[in-house]
């Protein structure tokens, strides 16, 4: 990923400064980019894939139990739906496309950080994770067929 976009990511995400996260495990090659923002309780993993930015979240130390940010927020905020808007799709400049996505993602992270923390820090975390899985199966049954 271009340095300009990485710089913009750091400007958008003040997680380290504002919420005690630290950056770790940054990978930047010609095909993809990823970086983790880690706190004592949970991790945000930002990744690029097919010209899009994705964010997954998991409890610190449990990367195999990660959930997609948008899916988690849709579950937490029911019946209100938080969409990953495609307003950036028409953007031809890849750096500008990533910047638009980052601006949106950082805004929804900050707007929902307390809810995210409450979900991941709950004493009923495993039950909530199970309920989230059922929500996802009901919402996207074709993704779970045969499994």
Image: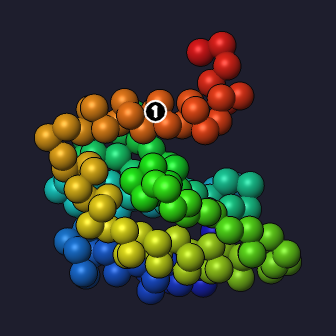
Q: Residue, x 61% and y 38% (percent of image)?
A: 139
Q: Residue at x 56, y 76 (%)?
A: 104
Q: Is residue 97 above or below residue 116?
A: below
- Residue 51 in picture, x, y percent from top left: 73, 62
Drawn side of residue 95 relative to residue 108, left or right: right
Q: Quadrant of the C terminus?
A: top right
For image coordinates 66% across by 13% down, the residue present is 146
Q: Nearer the viewer, residue 124 or 32?
A: 124
All told, the count of numbered labels is: 1
* Rendered image quadrant of residue 62: top left
The residue sitting at the top extreme is: 146
* Residue 11 visible in rendering: yes
Residue under the image location 26 percent in, 67 percent down: 114
- The answer to whether one can see residue 45 in this image is no
Instruction: Give x and y (percent) for residue 112.
Output: 37, 68
Task: Indicate the position of residue 6 as horizontal and vertical percent values.
Answer: 53, 76
In this rendering, the answer to whether 90 lies above or below 69 is below
The residue identified by callout 1 is 133
Q: Position of residue 59 (x, y in %)?
A: 27, 45
Q: How is the image coloured?
A: rainbow
How crowded is the residue under tag 1: few (<14 C-alpha within 10 Å), some, or many (20+)?
Answer: some
The quarter of the image holding the N terminus is bottom right
Q: Farthest residue in the left direction?
A: 123
Numbered disc 1: secondary structure: helix
């Amino acid at each position: 990923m271009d340095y300009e976009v990485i710089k913009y990511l750091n400007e958008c995400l003040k997680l380290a400064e504002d919420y005690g996260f630290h950056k770790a495990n940054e990978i930047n090659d010609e095909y993809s980019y990823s970086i983790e923002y880690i706190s004592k309780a949970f991790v945000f993993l930002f990744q690029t894939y097919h010209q899009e930015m994705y964010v997954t979240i998991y409890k610190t130390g449990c990367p195999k139990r990660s959930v997609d940010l948008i899916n988690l927020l849709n579950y937490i905020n029911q019946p209100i739906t938080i969409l990953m808007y495609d307003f950036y799709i028409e953007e031809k400049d890849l750096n500008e496309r990533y910047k638009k996505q980052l601006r949106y993602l950082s805004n929804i992270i900050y707007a929902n950080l307390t809810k995210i923390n409450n979900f991941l820090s709950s004493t009923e975390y495993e039950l909530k994770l199970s309920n989230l899985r059922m929500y996802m199966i009901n919402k996207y049954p074709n993704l779970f067929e045969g499994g």
